[in-house]
Image (cartoon, rainbow, N blue to C red):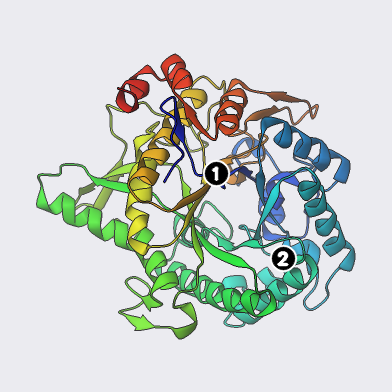
Amino acid sequence: MSDTNPAILKMPSAFLWGAATAAHQNEGGNSNNQWAAWEAQPGRIFGGGHAGQTTGWWNLESAAADFDRAAELGLNSLRLSVEWSRIEPAPGLFDQTALRHYAAMIGLLRARGLEPMVTLHHFTDPLWLTELGAWENPQVEDYFVRFVTRVVEALGDQVTLWCTINEPFVYAYMGFLDGGFPPGASSLTRMIGVLRRMLLAHGRAYRTIHRLQNNARVGAVHNMQVFLPANPARRTDRLATAATNQIANHSVLAAVTSGRLTPPLGVGQQVSYLMDSTDFIGLNHYSTSRVAFDPRQPGRLFTRQFFDPDVELSDITFNGQPYGEINPHSLYLALKELARYKKPIYITEHGLPDWDDDARPAFTAASLAEAWRAAQEGVDLRGYYHWTLVDNFEWAAGWSLKFGLIDFDPETGIRTPKTSAAVYSRIIQANGVPRSLLEKIVPEAAARYFT
C-alpha cells in the first residue's frame, strides 16, 4: 500500500495533500443567501459575529495570496465550494460573471499545482430558494440539477473532482431538529424530509455530472461521528450506540452506495438513481461520542451522548461545551468503518479547534499516523484535506473557533502561519509521517509505530 521507508509512515505516491474551505466562510460579501440573513438576526451567531468580508477570497488577489501560501506549504490540492446565490442570484438567472470568476479562481489553483476539489453545495442556499421552501420544496431537486448543470458546463474543463452536497445530515439535523442553523426548526419529521430530499438530489446530481463529463469523479461527503458504547459490557448501551450509528451515519452511506433508504429515511425502499451514486466517499471527521441508553430521553431515542472524561477535550464552543475529544485514534476507527462500503476514500475534512495551536501539531501528526495504519490494513485512502487553511467564519460559532493552519485577524486581515502549518508541511514534503517528527512531538505514537 505504501512506499517502503522505515523512517517514514509513507502514503501512496499519488496521494492528495490538501486543505478544505467553503465559499461563505472565505469569500466575503455573500449577502444573498440564508446564512447572511440568519447572521443579521440578533442572538443567532456567537458573539454577534457575521461573516462580513471574512478572508476576502472573492478578491482574486487575496485568494491568490492564500493559494501561494498553500503551495508554499507543499499542498497539491485544495477543496473549495461555489456559492449558489452568486451563480444563480434569481431563479433561472445565471450570472456568467460569477462563473467566470470561479473559473479564474480554479485557474489560479492549477497554476500553483493545486488540484481543485469543488463542492457544489456547502450549507448555503440562495434567498430565492429559501423563500420557496428550500429543501422542503419538492421541486428543489430540479433546481439543484439545473444549477449543477450550469456549473459543470462552465468549470468542467478544469475540474474532475466534485463533491455534491456537503454533510447533508448536518444540514438537516442542525437546521431542522437542533435549531442552531437556519431555519432554526425543531421537528424530526421535517429533518427526515430534508435529509431524504438532499440525498435524492445528490443521486440526480451524480448522474448529471457523469452525463456531462466523462472523466468526472463525483463523491458524497458525509460527516461521520464515531459512536462508542458508554459501557461495552451493557447490552442496552450497545443497542443505543448501534441505533445512533445507523441513523447518523449508515442511513446516508447506505443510500448513496446501495440505493436503499433505511431508517429513518425509509424501510428498505430502493431508488435506482441512488444506487452506486458515489465514486468515492468524502469523510469529514471531527469527534467521537460515548452513547448510553437513557430511559429519561425519549426525544433523543432514549440515548445520552457525552465525551470520555478520561480523554483530553478541545476548545470550548459557542454553546459552552468542548467541541470534542482530542482523539487521533478516532480517525482510524472512522476509516475502518467506512471501508465496508468498498469505495475509495478522501478525508475531505479533519481538524481541531485550537485557539493557541498548542494541541493541533501533535494531533495532526498522530491522526495521520492513524490514517496510515488504516491504509496499511487495506483502506483505499486517496487524500487528506485539513480543515482549514486560514482561520475563518465558523457558522453559528462565528469567530470563536480557530481551525486554520494560518492565523487570521479579522480586524486587520493579517495572516500568520502557525506551528501546525510547519508540521503539516513537513509531513507533506515526506509524503508521510516521519519518525523523527513523531519522536519529537508525539513520542508515544513513535513508540507504537516504530519498534
Can you give x and y, in whole percent of width and height, for residue 90 in the image?
80, 72
Crowd band around label 1 with a 10 angstrom C-alpha radius: few (<14), some (14–19), many (20+): few
Between residue 342 and residue 335, name the one nearer to us: 342
Between residue 107 and residue 195, name the one nearer to us: 107
- Residue at which label 1 appears: 13
Question: In the rendered image, is residue 432 in sight?
Answer: yes
Mark sitting earlier along the chain (1/2): 1
Res 37 quadrant in image:
bottom right
Q: How many marks?
A: 2
Q: Residue at x 34, y 70 (%)?
A: 264
Between residue 334 and residue 182, name the one nearer to us: 334
Can you give x and y, in whole percent of width and height, for residue 59 in the image?
86, 45
Determine whether, in the image, residue 269 is placed left or right of residue 275.
Answer: left
Question: In the rendered image, is residue 315 in sight?
Answer: no
User: In the displayed structure, would residue 139 be above or below residue 144?
Assistant: below
Can you give x and y, in whole percent of width and height, for residue 250 in the image?
35, 63
Q: Amino acid at mark 2?
A: Pro
Crowd band around label 2 with a 10 angstrom C-alpha radius: few (<14), some (14–19), many (20+): many
Residue farthest to the front? 4
Q: CA distance from mark 1 to mark 2?
A: 40 Å
Quadrant in which the C terminus appears: top left
User: In the displayed structure, would residue 341 be above or below residue 202?
Assistant: above
Question: SS of the residue at dot 1?
Answer: loop
Q: Amino acid at mark 1?
A: Ser
Determine whether, in the image, residue 291 is placed left or right of residue 316.
Answer: left
Determine whether, in the image, residue 350 is placed left or right of residue 124.
Answer: left
- Residue at which label 2 appears: 126
Can you give x and y, in whole percent of width and height, for residue 231 in the image?
15, 42
Res 397 quadrant in image:
top right
Between residue 423 and residue 10, name the one nearer to us: 10
Q: Residue at x 65, y 80 (%)?
A: 211
Please say if the residues under marks 1 and 2 sit with CB atoms less than 8 Å apart.
no
